[in-house]
Amino acid sequence: MALTVAIQMDPIESIDIDADSTFVLALEAQKRGHALYHYLPRDLAYLDGRLLARVRPLQVRRAHGDHFTLGEPRDLDLAEADIVLMRQDPPFDLAYITATHLLEHVHPRTFVVNDPASVRNAPEKLLMTAFRELIPPTLITSDRARVHAFRAEHKDIVVKPLYGNGGAGVFHLPPGDENLNALLEMFEDVSREPLMVQAYIPEVRQGDKRIILIDGEPAGVILRVPQVGEARSNMHVGGKAVKESLSERDREICAAIGPTLRERGLIFVGIDVIGPYLTEINVTSPTGLQEINRFDGCCLEAGIWDAIERRYQASRDA
């Protein structure tokens, strides 16, 4: 089937074609004969019941310095598109939330991936709290006294912004570290949002696993290893990807969360696992496809498009 695919993403000229997952999703869609259009979240407009996007026809190719061609801009009524890929990077702020509300006006008639209501209702660090048995000891609060009590119980803790991404603002506070009060003051000065506080997982020194799930099923995994002297393994802060395989515990975690992901229309998801614990469920703009493809000799984006096309056809037949 030849589909009209609108990709809501960040500026395409700024992406790293050797690492960006949206880029290979676009390549695979183009290979299948789908017509591609690119637009930025700020290009959305609601007008008299219609959801418009100022789009530009898009062609992509794996050529450094010449990886895309954009046509002339025009308004596209997204109700006339077949698929919208919502792939802009976090932060998960009010602009992001607004985009999910707007896209609900066309979904599922225009099939939005991932489901915009589910993206809004499943922030990375909050959805995992529905699976208490899978996550480390966790506190979400704005109450300093509760943070101190949690630290008194668990000694070694990690403090992070609830809606942060890419490892930004993540602090490891081992026993004896005297910076907790100053850290809480800093967070209070810049945000009214609660913090997430977790017991430190020592296995993070060996790395954390990024597992890709396609329509609720595990499809691939890499291990992201932190630099020496760094507690964060995110690629944005220098983490190194290495080949990995799924453990029995990883499969248990995927089996536990898979039905919820499928039910919520979360087709492309990346989860983070440290040691035996689930630490995030990434539903906004998951990454990791190209790294896994290189290690495993696979093409995860083809599996994602198979799932999208299958779901799209089912929504037409319903």
Image: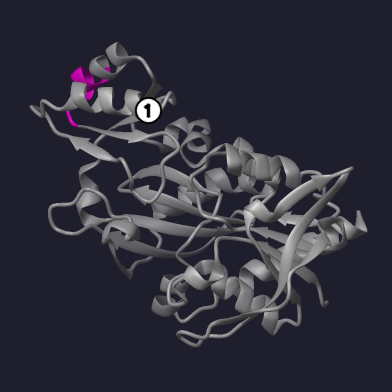
The residue furthest left is 176
Task: Count up the numbered dots.
Answer: 1
Q: Is residue 152 magenta?
A: yes
Residue appearing at x 28%, y 57% in the figure: 237
Residue appearing at x 34%, y 23% in the figure: 188
Looking at the image, residue 188 sits to the left or right of residue 155; the answer is right
Residue 258 image offset from top left, x and y in percent:
59, 49
The residue furthest top is 145
**Of the pair 70 and 25, the residue shown nearer to us:** 70
Disc 1 target residue? 195
Residue 165 image offset from top left, x and y in percent:
41, 47
Q: Is residue 52 above or below residue 32?
A: above
Question: Over which residues does the magenta segment extend?
Answer: 150-156
Residue 264 appears anywhere in the view: no
Q: Residues within 10 Å of mark 1 (few under 14, many from 20)?
A: many
> Which quarter shows the N terminus?
bottom right
Residue type at tag 1: Leu
**Of the pair 294 and 113, the residue shown nearer to us:** 113
Q: Main secondary structure of the magenta part?
A: helix
